[in-house]
């Protein structure tokens, strides 16, 4: 049974991307479509849980989409996790399910970080959701874990550093990766980024 950690303030923020899905393999933009984990993705989630080793968190939040919620469950945190709709992946609108190559065939200079998604969210809109999560995180007492999605977590990391949402484009996240944000002398920092060593034997 995983318990809740207590401390005087929020200490570290753990960003946990969901495991592999059929769409992540294909490079398809997977926003609100509820795509399940592959068998390998399930193994990755279990490996993530072993890596965390039952670490206690003051607060565990998960996106409601099954690829993140199932990663949370297979990692061993379903009993303490709370759903947060602000952790949903970027709404890709008309670009849902398409690869970047397919989108650029119509819009050659397009990037999600600069242009957002046609009929979906802009970078600033995703940034505002990330800001709400950060406010909730900073109110917690102890370490916090977030089970969510690549573009959302990259945006959140940018906002953690007080950078514009588009700065998330300079950060990359593999499936089932672990990243840790923290505070050093009152300055928000990245402590570890995109760790995947725990996946070597999955």
Image (cartoon, grey):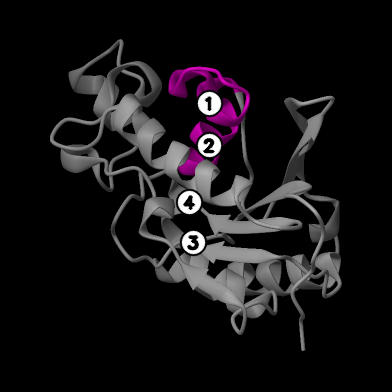
Disc 2 vs disc 3: which is toward the camera?
2
Q: Secondary structure at mark 4?
A: helix
Judging by the rendered image, the residue that carries numbered circle 4 is: 24
Check the image and report above or below for 123 versus 4.
Answer: above
Q: Which residues are magenta?
A: 149-170
Q: What is the distance, in whole Å, between disc 2 and disc 1 at their CAs?
A: 8 Å
Dot 3, how many residues are within 10 Å of its Cα: few (below 14), some (14-19), or many (20+)? many
Judging by the rendered image, the residue that carries numbered circle 1 is: 168
Are circles 2 and 1 on residues that touch, CB within 8 Å? yes
Q: Quadrant of residue 182?
A: top right
Dot 2, how many residues are within 10 Å of its Cα: few (below 14), some (14-19), or many (20+)? many
Q: Secondary structure at mark 3?
A: loop
**Earlier sequence position, callout 1 versus callout 4:** 4
**Earlier sequence position, callout 2 versus callout 4:** 4
Check if residue 53 falls in the magenta segment: no
Judging by the rendered image, the residue that carries numbered circle 2 is: 156
């Amino acid at each position: 049974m995983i318990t809740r950690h207590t401390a005087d303030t929020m200490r570290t923020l753990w960003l946990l991307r969901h495991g592999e899905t059929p769409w992540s393999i294909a490079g398809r933009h997977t926003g609100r479509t509820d795509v399940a984990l592959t068998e390998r993705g399930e193994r990755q989630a279990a490996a993530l849980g072993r890596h965390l080793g039952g670490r206690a968190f003051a607060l565990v939040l998960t996106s409601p989409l099954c690829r993140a919620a199932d990663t949370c469950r297979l990692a061993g945190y379903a009993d303490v996790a709370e759903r947060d709709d602000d952790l949903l992946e970027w709404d890709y609108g008309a670009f849902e399910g398409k690869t970047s190559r397919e989108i650029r065939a119509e819009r050659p200079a397009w990037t999600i970080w600069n242009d957002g998604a046609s009929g979906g969210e802009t970078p600033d809109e995703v940034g505002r959701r990330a800001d709400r999560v950060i406010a909730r995180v900073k109110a917690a007492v102890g370490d916090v874990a977030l089970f969510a999605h690549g573009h959302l977590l990259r945006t959140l990391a940018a906002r953690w550093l007080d950078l514009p949402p588009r700065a998330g484009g300079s950060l990359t996240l593999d499936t089932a990766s672990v990243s840790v944000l923290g505070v050093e002398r009152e300055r928000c920092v990245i402590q570890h980024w995109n760790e995947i060593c725990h996946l070597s034997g999955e």
